[in-house]
Amino acid sequence: MKQPINGFSKLPKEEKINWLATHYFTNKEEGITILKSYWNSDKKLQQLHDEFIENTITNFYLPQGIAPNFLINGSLLSIPMAIEESSVVAAASNAAKFWLTRGGFHAEVRSTIKIGQVHFIFNGSKSVLSSFFNEKKAIFLKESEPITRNMQKRGGGILDIELIDKTDQMSGYYQLHCSFETLDAMGANFINSCLEQFAKTLKKEALSYPLFNDKEKNIEVIMSILSNYVPECLVKVWVECPVEKLFNDSEKSLDFARRFVTAVNIAKIEPYRAVTHNKGIMNGIDAVVIATGNDFRAIEAGVHAYASKNGRYKSLSHAEITNGIFKFSMELPLALGTVGGLTKLHPLVQLNLDMLGNPGAKQLMKIVAVAGLAQNFAALRSLTTSGIQEGHMKMHLGNILNQLEATSEERKQVETHFSSNTITHSAVTDFINQLRNN
Ligand code: MEV
């Protein structure tokens, strides 16, 4: 019978592993060897990773690839991508190469406003609460100055605080809805610290406000937290060229453009397709977000919420043919940082930012969004022409061969055979078994 454990987090790493292996591994020694094989031999580097989180027992590796040849607003970049899915880096690289000779990618940041809220319950007169807020607004700003001073010096800080009445949806529910400019920081710590200070000021000032009765003086703060929905932290990216420049053959070009636009339009009206369409975009986005030490869960949450901002989930990207010009574009929210958090702590993240030219947050927003658009272009290009499986399975073949522990002679024969036959897991397994039986 398994027993719960107390004080697990206090145990040294070796003891944590030993306990885990004793109680939860089928093969204790083998399991421990696997865990340790992922430890870094550089003890300092390993310690750095151990301390990122609680109860670290090993590292979970993702491969990092590079997608070169990205022309973005006239500058050539090689983009680092950390991802396990076999075809993503190849697809991004293909799209980069395709657009390299057709004007490259264009990108512009539309806005960089971030949001946080203090959610509270106030049971009393709305108009008195509103007067209280208007009278005290300057105190909220003043009392948060120790937190905002540095950010303000650099040109950022609190943009506004609004009182929002939500009582039509929940009895007594109000918010301080606050907007921030956090410059090159993702800003989560800054925003949350400001919000927690606002909450303190709110409670304190309410207690001594003479126009509140005793019940009104006791404002109940439920929580203070930033929002990962950032519809005003937007970047727009696009590619465009005359339709006849898409391919050498003008009929093929027109047919491609027409089918491509139709595919995007399907993802605008059909949620089942839109989710997969946007997943393809996130293949590119997450890979760069991870490689640059940003929070991919925050990005995912914000992007998918934005995709349903009008009440129905739909494609983030748009495609059109206007006056003979094919244009493929996307606007999406990305709250990213290039200072603070992992960006300074993780040597590989630092190197990745260095290879991108040490971008500020706005430049990183452009790069990440371009990777998403490139990925979407590559996916739609295959889907509307050869189908996705041809490329996918070619990339996946290596994984299957590794799984089967194929020798280099077997690999050669597999490559020859499957250059003209459909790759499936079972077809490759059968083929290898046949070779081995002969
Ligand atoms: C696979 O990871 C992503 C795609 O399904 C995206 C799409 O269908 O557009 C290929």
Image (cartoon, helix red, strand yellow):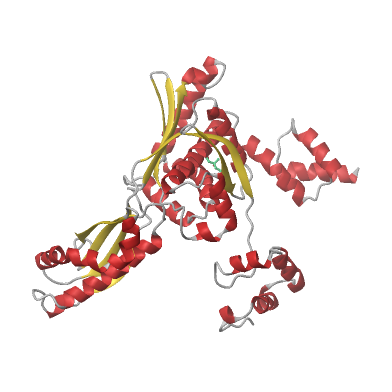
Q: Residue placed at 33% from the left, 47% from the top?
A: 309
Residue most extreme to the top: 250
The quarter of the image holding the N terminus is bottom right
The quarter of the image holding the C terminus is top right
Q: Residue placed at 50% from the left, 30% from the top?
A: 104
Q: Residue placed at 17% from the left, 74% from the top?
A: 206
In the displayed structure image, the side of residue 78 where residue 268 appears, left or right: left
Residue most extreme to the right: 438
**Relative to the observer, which residue lies in front, 284 or 167?**
284
In the displayed structure image, the side of residue 84 where residue 185 appears, left or right: left
Counting from the top left corner in percent of width and height, residue 184 is at 41, 52
Q: Residue placed at 44% from the left, 43% from the top?
A: 363
Q: Quadrant of ligand 1?
A: top right
Q: Is residue 70 above or below residue 142?
A: above
Q: How many marks?
A: 0
In the displayed structure image, the side of residue 93 where residue 438 appears, left or right: right
User: Which corner quadrant of the image does residue 202 belong to?
Assistant: bottom left
From where the camera sits, is residue 353 visible? Answer: yes
Counting from the top left corner in percent of width and height, residue 70 is at 54, 35
From where the camera sits, is residue 170 visible? Answer: no
Counting from the top left corner in percent of width and height, residue 273 is at 46, 41
Q: Is residue 280 above or below residue 25?
A: above
**Relative to the observer, which residue lies in front, 235 or 416?**
235
Q: Is residue 217 above or below residue 244?
A: below
User: Which corner quadrant of the image does residue 418 belong to?
Assistant: top right
Counting from the top left corner in percent of width and height, residue 60 is at 63, 61
